[in-house]
Image: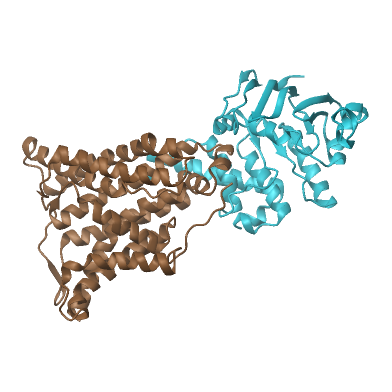
Chain colours: A cyan, B brown
Amino acid sequence: MITLLEARGVGKRFGGLTALADVSLTIRQGEVYGLIGPNGAGKTTFFNVLTGAYVPEDGEFVFEGSPLPQGKPHQVVAAGIARTFQNIRLFRELSALENVMCGHHIRTQAGVWGILTQSRQAREEERLTTERAFELLTYVGIERFADTVAKNLSYGDQRRLEIARALATEPRLLALDEPAAGMNATETGRLKSLIEQIRHDGVTVLLIEHDVKLVMGLCDRVAVLDFGKKIAEDVPAVVQQNPAVISAYLGGGKHGH
Amino acid sequence: MDILLQQIVNGLVVGSVYALIALGYTMVYGILGLINFAHGEVLMIGALTALQTLGVLERIAPDLGPLAQLAIALGVAVPVCMTLGFLMERLAYRRLRNAPRLAPLITAIGVSFLLQTVAMILWGRNYHTFPQLIPTTPLEPVSGVFITPVQITIVVVSALMMAGLLVLVNRTRLGRAMRATAENHRVASLMGVDVNAIIGATFVIGAGLAAVAGVMFASNYGIAHYAMGFLPGLKAFTAAVLGGIGNLGGAMLGGIVLGLVESLGAGYIEHLSFGFLNSSYQDIFAFIILGLVLIFRPTGLLGERVSDRA
């Protein structure tokens, strides 16, 4: 199996609070990798450090063999990592289509001059971006809302739109932050098939999720974070039996609550 | 009746210059939440750079036609102002992006003073005659109503530039990234938009518009000097607030409305004040409007672009 992403001893502190401590993990190409843990365990912080929103104090990420730039989100996107957000962060005033087209920004080149003069290249690029964005809306199943302003979409469709926007950046790794949050069973089922489809189409998926059933049914391997430390990493069936994991989720054990 | 029509014509001319300047204020506000009070000074630098270029042209290529001269002057002034806009953001505002709002605001006022002083050192304190390269002989399309070719040019050029800007913002890759960045910097960058580049581009485009406005302003009045940016800058800011700051359509509407109010006010102020005030008091209208809008409708005519920042 080829390694796609390697976290090497990543540490992040906020003042006196250690959000991540010496987290190392390896994500292989083509798998769905789950990141779970109790609330406040550092999962979203891990996403933020990975995507360059925060600069870690220790460690680094190696993606496809080269270190990721730290604190430069758009360069991380350019390297091939895209994300969605736990609490939806769409461009609310832009249409669904425009949201996806924005995601494609990094894969297009037209400069100010080409745009101002409407060069043939700029127009062709814009046409392809529109076409691709429409394909992605179809892919996630919301093409009929292409011209709807994002804030007017239903909650489930907003989540799908976030995935389409992330896919528009043409990622090698798609990081989903609690994509099933607030979804009912039917919606979660559709989300599961969408993620399976994405993996099938060659994009590796990193998934933060609370829905244990979804994680266990979808992920090839799972890492568990607790108080910023990785306490387990294995296939779901093994992780589920791990005493440290059980105590982290059910309380008690060494943390005493 | 003639007076009314004439004042409407004058108002449209001045208003379209205000609108062009107001766009620079409103674009920067939309994307950064910053009132760039140095924006009026960009207009001044544009006009004086064009004047300098015309002076040089006169020496090295005296046979050039007036339109070619004007084109070359614009061709120098616009890139100079664009560079200035870029540098302003890069050197003064970028490092204050996460500071409390008052800090960049005060800095903007500081940049404004700085540019005025530099211009005063370079070009002196005197008023310079700005060559009127487009004919100023008035035409009389309707009897009793006069409009000069310069004024027609101003209205047409402004309209074209505003239309171009709307297309740019609403229909292109760059404009889309600008709107995304205006809504949320962090998310835009996490979606692959180079936010610094987009903010830079916003300043550059706004400064380019201001440069054109400056040259037109100077051509219309035939005068250029180091402090000429102050009043139009302040009025264009008023226009942006009147239309709803952060809103492009609002800046255009606000500019035209302000131009009309000011020019109609100037035409009738003597009647209105029973001969106590005359048309040299026309500037009060802009600031009465600014006061009224801020008190009664702070979001402006078309409403401020409200976006929840993360």
Residue B76 vertical position relative to residue B19 in the rendered view, above or below:
above
Residue A138 appears at what percent x and percent y? 68, 48
Quadrant showing the C terminus of chain A: top right
Quadrant showing the N terminus of chain A: top right
- Does residue A111 appear in this view? no
Residue B233 vertical position relative to residue A121 in the rendered view, above or below:
below
Q: Quadrant of residue A66?
A: top right
Residue A185 appears at what percent x and percent y? 85, 50
- Does residue B47 appear in this view? yes
Residue B163 appears at what percent x and percent y? 37, 56
Nearer the observer, B8 or B309: B309
Q: Residue at x 12, y 54 (%)?
A: B222
Nearer the observer, B6 or A43: A43
Residue B185 vertical position relative to residue A231 in the rendered view, above or below:
below
Q: Residue at x 8, y 37 (%)?
A: B61
Badge count: 0
Q: Judge left or right: residue A189 versus residue A83.
A: right
Q: Quadrant of residue B249?
A: bottom left
Residue A8 appears at what percent x and percent y? 69, 19
Q: Residue at x 14, y 55 (%)?
A: B134
